[in-house]
Image (spheres, helix red, strand yellow):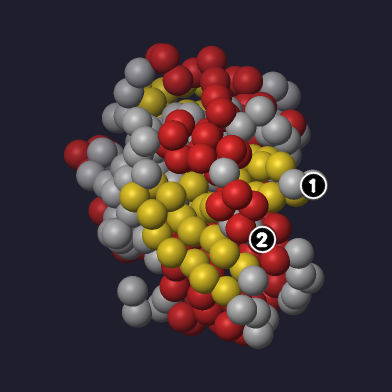
Amino acid sequence: MIRAAVLGSPISHSLSPKIHRKAYDLLDLDSEYTAIEVDEKSFPDFFQNLESSDDGSKWSGFSLTMPLKEIVLQYCVASDPIAKRIDSGNTLFRSDNSWKVTSTDYLAFQNLLKVSKNSKVAIIGGGGTARAAIGALNTQVAAVDVLLRSESRMAALVKAAPDLQVKKLDMTHALNDYDLIVQTTPAGVFDEYVSNTAVAKGTLLEALYKPSPTSLGRRYKELGGEVISGKELLVEQALFQIQLFTGQEFDFAEMRKALLSAIADD
């Protein structure tokens, strides 16, 4: 039986249960996927119980969302090289009778971010999702501009993409000339700067799926740019999680279409 859950706080809004349940039904698997409220304070005890009790072996894996993507690396020592480099993990899974952490956000960004070496790229924000995005762009482009409120996030971003030239810009910077923009900040954080962008010549990928589109997404689309919704990112990273939790191979294109359809009205 597949037994999995999404962990985070707040968690009631998450579409992960709907996505995973649909996938397991399509794969004709006996399964259970729930949402569990776990914050930074309760995660250490939650993870210790997974490792020390018989109940831990009954779980197939966990999807991790805010605020657990960074703290998980402090407790799960079996992190893959990518998770260590980007200091972020969104997936806990059982392998060889132990827990391991990886980032399917990183894998999803690799699939979704279409660039060339000379593409002009901007990332808004500097948290775990931003590091997954910039990590996926490492070696794919020459440079990335990062819009940040604070210098404190820069060291981790540079570590995540050691082969890139990373430049910090203020949040007020206009996004007129970019081929690709990745927006990773929480809801409302970037709203006051949206009007600074007057031209949309490329693609905007939004990590948020509630609200969708964001104020920036609406403006970018009105200006003629392409917008990739947060739902597409959510489904893409889930495809890799489903593969890890079930151990099954399946057609990503067919599953992607079915899962996006399942959450189209949410």
On residue 52, the disc is: none
Q: How far apart are marks 1 and 2 (CA)?
A: 13 Å
Q: Nearer the viewer, residue 231 or 148?
A: 231
The type of residue carrying mark 2 is Phe
The type of residue carrying mark 1 is Asp
Q: Nearer the viewer, residue 194 or 247?
A: 247
Residue lying at the far front in this picture: please name it.
Answer: 54
Q: Which image quarter holds the C terminus?
A: bottom left
Q: Which of 114 and 189 is in front in this view?
A: 189
Q: Quadrant of residue 46?
A: top left
Q: Is residue 214 left or right of residue 192?
A: right
Residue beneath label 2, please? 245
Residue 68 x, y percent position in the rendering: 44, 38
Residue drawn at x 49%, y 18% is 154
The answer to whether residue 242 is seen in the rendering is: yes
Mark 2: give few (<14), some (14-19) or many (20+) Cα within 10 Å. Answer: many
Residue beneath label 1, please? 96
| In this rendering, the label closer to the viewer, 1 or 2 | 1
The answer to whether residue 241 is seen in the rendering is: no
Dot 1: element: loop
